[in-house]
Image (cartoon, rainbow, N blue to C red):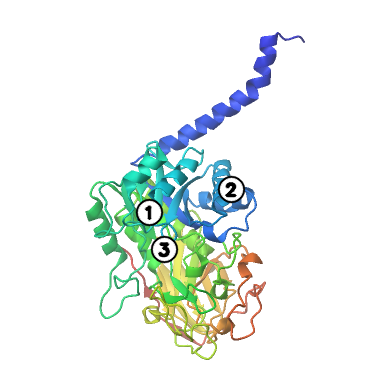
Amino acid sequence: MQFSTLTWVALLFAPFVAGAALQAQAANSLEKRATASDKLVFSHFMIGIVSDRTSAADYDADMQRAKAYGIDAFALNIGTDDYTDTQLGYAYDSAANNDMKVFISFDFNWYSSSSSAAAVGQKVASYGSRTAQLKIDGKVFVSSFAGDGLDVAAVRSASGMDLFVVPNFHPGQGDFSNLDGGFNWMGWQSDGNNKAPQNGVTLTVAAGDNTYRSTLGSKAYMAPASPWFFTHFGSEVDYSKNWVFPGDLLWYARWLEILATPPNYVEIVTWNDYGESHYVGPLSSKHYDDGGSKWVNDMPHNGWLDMAKPFIAAYKAGESSVNSRITSDQIVYWYRASPRDTNCDATDTTMGAANNASGNYFNGRPNGWQTLEDSVFVVPLLTSSGTVTVNSGGIQYTINAPAGASAWSVPMGLGAQTFTLSRNGATVLSDTSLKQIKAECPCGLYNFNSYVGTVPAGASDPLGSDGLSRLTTGLKVACDAAPSLPATPPAAAAVTATGVATAGPTSV
């Protein structure tokens, strides 16, 4: 068969033309989806701890997992580290390869609100035209952690691009007049001064929502959703801090609030900030240890994303109920691994003096520890009503769980934790957690992080070697820098008594 020169040229370039057309079609589809009226979900991703990643492929698992749960983009938190641009390049490439979006969130612990406007704008310009850049109505999305006082007009000018600016400015402190929206970081109840509620003062997350909405008016509001907060750095680092915010059933209650009064956007805080215990991404997500492995090892949080998945789908669809989004039975549960009054003073790493420039360093138990219940928290996600039994250390609780999502708590019992779903007297699901509750001090510490599990059980998710590299630094007792959950669950505790479960929130 013979071809003319023009035919050969057409055949030669056909794959490239077709590929470009498909890429343009995909980009146009995503671009069309990202309009100001869309409900989108993001997750805060810490670039500062992932300098051990060596290619875009190292981001693929994170991108694929986030996308599978309905997350639209990662907010890439950056400082001024010398590896930042390398890692941003990898993240943007991986996002493009996996049909995800990303945007930069400038961390003003490192940038200066008074002098970094040009640098912020120039950084946005370096990445804003990339395929994976999130855009709203064609405008480059950019955010921040803190930054009140930043000259946003100067950022826009330095970028040379149309921007959609949604920073973490604070009502009463930042100038909202030149913004496209605002981001509220505070996804936990507080005293209004970055501490857990105290002295009768409680600022709820919903109250923060209302303040931001009032300040923003018709501008976009990006609301936080966070499951937990515990950090416990002592003198072994120069960023010592030791406090909690109330967790318990916060994650469930927060998603009820989001469905009841949906914001323009939701940002999950966070994907991978292990040091503050509010990660919903895998422990195995590649990262360097900032010292938080002391309380993160053997404490997976993957079940929290399982719980959130139907809520994310309902939120994005404008639905007020998750019932139609639950297609298989699952039980999600979480708890701290030791009672709060367990005494670890003799071996804890925060008993001595340390840098307290932040005002958040306290000796011993974390500030705010009294706000956490000694309970096991259970969220059944059911296709139809069923009976859920919780055996916490030999005390058994029976829950008549409705179809859809519901939340419950039972008093924490020492020993094995077993969860069962049955219908009409037949067992549907049953499993015992790998993590027992013990009146002990793991690695000598006050560990107020949460263990999260599911029935059926999820895949094993251990920390990698990089994520364990500083576990022993500063410890007062011997402790192996290695995952230690057993391969199989312990035996269920023999039932010695029964109790009554407490129902969680059903509405806001």
Identity, as a three-letter code, of the amino acid under mark 3: Ser
Residue sitting at the far right: 1
Q: Nearer the viewer, mark 2 or mark 1?
A: 1
Q: In which quarter of the image is residue 174?
A: bottom left
Q: Position of residue 158 (x, y in %)?
A: 40, 42
Q: Position of residue 77 (x, y in %)?
A: 47, 55
**Counting other residues with Cα less than 10 Å from the Cα at mark 3, is it few (<14), some (14-19), or many (20 or more)?**
many
Badge number at residue 115: 1
Q: Nearer the viewer, mark 1 or mark 3?
A: 1
**Secondary structure found at label 2:** helix
Which residue occupies 41% across, 41% down? 159
Q: Which of marks 2 and 3 is nearer the N terminus?
A: 2
Q: Where is residue 381 in the image (x, y as percent from the top left)?
A: 46, 61
Badge number at residue 443: none
According to the picture, the residue beneath numbered tag 3 turns out to be: 226
**Secondary structure found at label 3:** loop
Q: Is residue 181 above or below residue 4?
A: below
The quadrant of the picture occupied by the C terminus is: bottom left
Identity, as a three-letter code, of the amino acid under mark 1: Ser
Q: Earlier in the sequence, mark 2 or mark 1?
A: 2
> Between 90 and 262, which is closer to the camera in this rendering?
90
Q: In this view, does 324 lie above or below 413?
A: above
**Counting other residues with Cα less than 10 Å from the Cα at mark 1, is it few (<14), some (14-19), or many (20 or more)?**
few
**Counting other residues with Cα less than 10 Å from the Cα at mark 2, is it few (<14), some (14-19), or many (20 or more)?**
many
Which residue occupies 41% across, 35% down? 32
**Secondary structure found at label 1:** loop
Labels 2 & 1 near each other (Cβ < 8 A): no
According to the picture, the residue beneath numbered tag 2 turns out to be: 90
The CA span between labels 2 and 3 is 26 Å
